Amino acid sequence: EPEVTQTPSHQVTQMGQEVILRCVPISNHLYFYWYRQILGQKVEFLVSFYNNEISEKSEIFDDQFSVERPDGSNFTLKIRSTKLEDSAMYFCASSADRVSEAFFGQGTRLTVV
Amino acid sequence: KNEVEQSPQNLTAQEGEFITINCSYSVGISALHWLQQHPGGGIVSLFMLSSGKKKHGRLIATINIQEKHSSLHITASHPRDSAVYICAVRRAGGTSYGKLTFGQGTILTVHP
């Protein structure tokens, strides 16, 4: 069964460093999303991506965040200068279109120290 | 006020019990998801509903669009059902690109 894969599963980084979280969405899907979940809190939307551009973003997704689809398969989230409060579980999701079921990756746990 | 509210926040059951988790939402939606999150953190989609009822194994999900309410039922619960169950909605409207708005989750513990 096709699945969304995320790497790495866990990343520890020093405050101020740049991190790139990677996702391989399901191959025929066209809509891609990043969500995050701070420990003990609910999952929050960060950004959606369609047709090689950001289609929607939340107020959390400020200038330190960026997304890219560098080739036909990967979808990345870059955090330019990490802060302690960026520590969270980051989930990638994809769907065939804007009305179909979304499928989630296993998440990347980011710890900023 | 949260757009998606779940109840209860915590639920403890004995193996074999029938379980109900509720979700209420305050916005117009095009679909509602029920998701499962295990202690390792990964999220698995259980159901996507836009009307009526769906069943998969021991899991049943229902939605009442007029009342803006959905329920997830687990029949003959088992310790392996222990997880966080999350309700998430996709808003209706042409400006939505499919993003989901999540409830806070219900922590279910089933004891043998």
Image: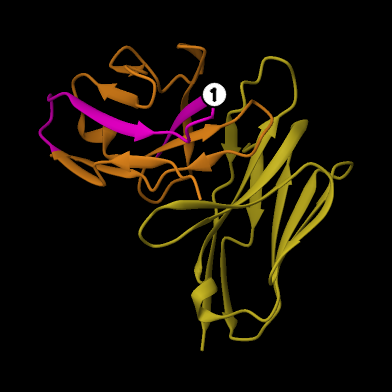
The colour applied to the residues of chain A in this rendering is orange
Q: At x 23% / y 27%, what residue is drawn?
A: A20
Asked whether residue A14 is drawn in magenta, I would say yes
Question: Which residue is at the front of the view, B4 or A32?
Answer: A32
Label 1 sits on a secondary structure element that is loop
B87 sits to left or right of A45: right
Asked whether residue B28 is drawn in magenta, I would say no
The colour applied to the residues of chain B in this rendering is yellow
Amino acid type at circle 1 is: Leu
Question: Which residue is at the front of the view, B47 or A14?
Answer: B47
Measuring from the top left, give residue A22's x and y in whole percent.
Answer: 30, 32
Measuring from the top left, give residue B45's x and y in whole percent.
Answer: 57, 50
Q: Is residue A71 above or below residue A112?
A: above
Measuring from the top left, give residue B93's x and y in whole percent.
Answer: 75, 20
**Where is mark 1, residue-wise?**
A30
Q: State the extent of the magenta-drawn residues as a range.
A: A13-36
Residue A89 in sight here: no
Q: Is residue B83 above or below residue A101?
A: below
Q: At x 46% / y 45%, what residue is drawn?
A: A3
Displayed quadrant of residue A105 = top left
